[in-house]
Amino acid sequence: MANFAVRLVHGPGWDPSRPIRDQDGWDEHAAFMDALVEEGFIILGGPVGNGEQTLHVVEAADENTVRTRFAQDPWASAGLLQVGVIEHWALWLDSRMPLVEAELNRRYPDRARMRPADPAGFRDAWATLERLWQQTVDRARQLPANLLYQQVDGEWSFIETLRHLVFATDAWVRRVILGEPSPWHPLDLPHDEMADEPGVPRDRKARPPLEQVLALRADRMATVRQIIAGLTDEKLAAMTEPVTEPGYPEPRSYSVRECLQIVLNEEWEHRLYAERDIDTLESAPRAT
């Protein structure tokens, strides 16, 4: 996860003769923004200067996620607000961050496990993720098969989410930690903002059956489980031997801790997104 500074600017639908709370659709916009705060996406924010722009600090996996989330604002579709600038922001000083962290950990009791300090903590974190993902997969199996390929508000479908997590494991575990220069499966799905790399697949039109993707996931999760089972303090602190072939991630040395933490972050955040989207799909009216 990373922090971003996001400036929202007035769009063509904004009425400059009216104050912000008198703009059309204020209640719907306010409810949407409150929900982003509630889920921990927005850390803080509000109008700056003369009020023609708003500045928000958000926590998200990447810039594409930031754009997608703000595009769901009722004011975005109505043309009142649009994303201006998105920049990475390293939050070094913020007296409220411990309070924010504590609140997120209260809402998601297993979240604190995702910042392990030692090999035992990584083993606990991975076991927790496997347990939670099994619950999510069980929910997804109850959906009609066609809904597993359906995107919600432009986000990845459930199948695409699983394919992306296969890619994340191939990238950070098989390529970086295990040293396989080209570990890719044809169904791997990189993040959208990643530039195309020779040999790295990106088939957005593929519609593999759920069981095929789950088999891939089981194989990759077993690899992570095996590596974490053998972790020692020395192995966790070690630096990887860089591959020489170009690709993603770039061929350099990484700490094993950094690689495994990235995998934990990806697994945790994308499961929350999947749960949110399953909620939507479950509540949507279906043809009879």
Image (tube, rainbow, N blue to C red):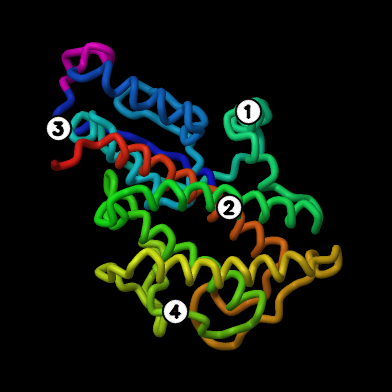
Q: Which residues are magenta?
A: 15-23
Mark drawn on residue 116: none
Depth check: 170 or 159 in front? Answer: 159
For marks 1 and 3, the one nearer the N-term is 3
Depth check: 214 or 175 in front? Answer: 214
As drawn, which residue projects farthest toward the front?
A: 288
Q: Is residue 218 magenta?
A: no
Classify 10 Å Cα crowding around label 4: few (below 14), some (14-19), many (20 and above). Answer: some
Say which residue appears at 52% left-offset and 31% top-offset. Answer: 43
Three-letter amino acid code of the residue under disc 3: Pro
Q: Is residue 164 left or right of residue 102?
A: left
For marks 1 and 2, the one nearer the N-term is 1
Where disc 3 sits, the SS reads loop
For marks 2 and 4, give the CA distance: 21 Å
The answer to whether residue 167 of the structure is visible from this angle is: no
- Circle 4 is placed at which residue position? 185
Q: Mark 2 vs mark 3: give the one in front.
A: 2
Classify 10 Å Cα crowding around label 2: few (below 14), some (14-19), many (20 and above). Answer: some
- Circle 1 is placed at which residue position? 106
Tag 1 and tag 2, C-beta contact below 8 Å: no
For marks 4 and 1, the one nearer the N-term is 1
Is residue 73 depicted above or below 214 in this figure? above
Say which residue appears at 23% left-offset and 29% top-offset. Answer: 75
For marks 4 and 3, give the CA distance: 45 Å
Q: Find residue 237 and report its horizontal and vertical position in percent.
A: 80, 65
- Circle 2 is placed at which residue position? 265
Q: Is residue 241 left or right of residue 272?
A: right
Q: Is residue 273 left or right of residue 231?
A: left
As drawn, which residue projects farthest toward the bottom?
A: 244
